[in-house]
Image (cartoon, grey):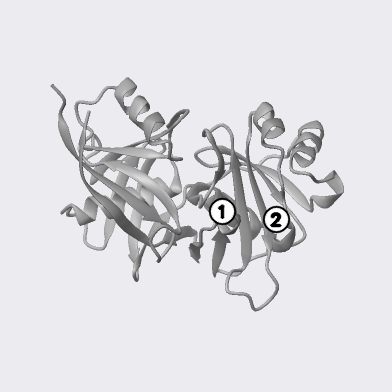
Amino acid sequence: MMNSRRFKQVDVFAFEALKGNPLAVVLEGLGLSDAQMQDFARWTNLSETTFLLPPTDPEADYRLRIFTPGGELPFAGHPTLGSCHAWLEAGGVPKASGQVVQQCGVGLVTIRQDGPRLAFAAPPVVSAEVEPSLLEAVAQGLGLTVADVLAARWLPLGPKWLCLRLASAGKVLSLEPDHGALSALGVDIGVVGFHPEGSEALYEVRAFTPLVGVVEDPVTGSLNAALAHWLAADGLVPTSYVAAQGTRLGRAGRVYITRDGETLWVGGASRTCIDGRLSL
């Protein structure tokens, strides 16, 4: 006999419905096996599916498990914001006023209300140099030469992102990747380029995610957090700004970055598009 569980599908990082990154949220994950969670995440065919569980840490409001079609992640950004939105909408009450504490694979993540948006405190990232041979292969897979890449870094934050900075947002948007070649490399790739001064968004982001099992991710919280850490360390961004992602996919993703002292907040809007029950 199948069990019925509360379920929501949430659009994250966009104010207009269907213009962000969809997330499947199972609000009652208790009692599901790892295999059932993975099977459902594969079936949804979304970049991430999450399962809410009672916390095991007394400081947390809930525990979150995050699955891609290809496996489980310790942390991801749009699942963090979308799951928190779904939990609050379903009647969740945080232990501390004004903030929600999520328990996940990386530990405790704080989420705060940021006007009409939620924002998470990004975990730290330790960057590393990219091997020249791999950089050349990634550039070729993106239709670039190494000379087109202004800078490159490994930025592990949830997924292990290999990130490239290009000369402009236009260059980022013009990419026509060889997805077969990128998939063979076995890395998740983030690309960033700055918009002209005075634009609504400071820069444009694209995420190519063969390890997640999605060719191009529409709007990616962990990648935007990693890029914000990197670009701030290089002195290239102000303390508060907006990043754009998903343009080539017909989306209008907007990620709100704010640095408050030592804390980097990554925020965005969420909207529930499907609200019902799931039978597994």
Residue 94 visible in the snapshot: no
Which residue occupies 78% across, 44% down? Answer: 143
Of the pair 70 and 129, the residue shown nearer to us: 70
User: Disc 2 marks which residue?
Assistant: 172
Amino acid type of disc 1? Leu
The picture places residue 152, in percent across and down from the top left corner, at 73, 46
Tell me if mark 1 has few (under 14), some (14-19) or many (20+) residues whose alpha carbon lies within 10 angstroms of its own: some
Q: Specify the farthest residue to the bottom.
A: 198
Q: Identify the element where label 1 is drawn.
A: helix
- 218 to the left or right of 121: right
Q: If the image is split into quadrants, where does the N terminus sit?
A: top left
Figure quadrant of the C terminus: top left
Answer yes or no: is residue 151 visible.
Answer: yes
* Residue occupied by mark 1: 249
Q: Quadrant of residue 271?
A: bottom left
Relative image position of residue 144 (x, y in whole percent): 80, 46
Q: At label 2, which amino acid type do we have?
A: Val
Image location (x, y in percent) of residue 279: 20, 32
Which element carries disc 2, helix, strand or loop? Answer: helix
Relative height, residue 141 to residue 13 (above, below): above
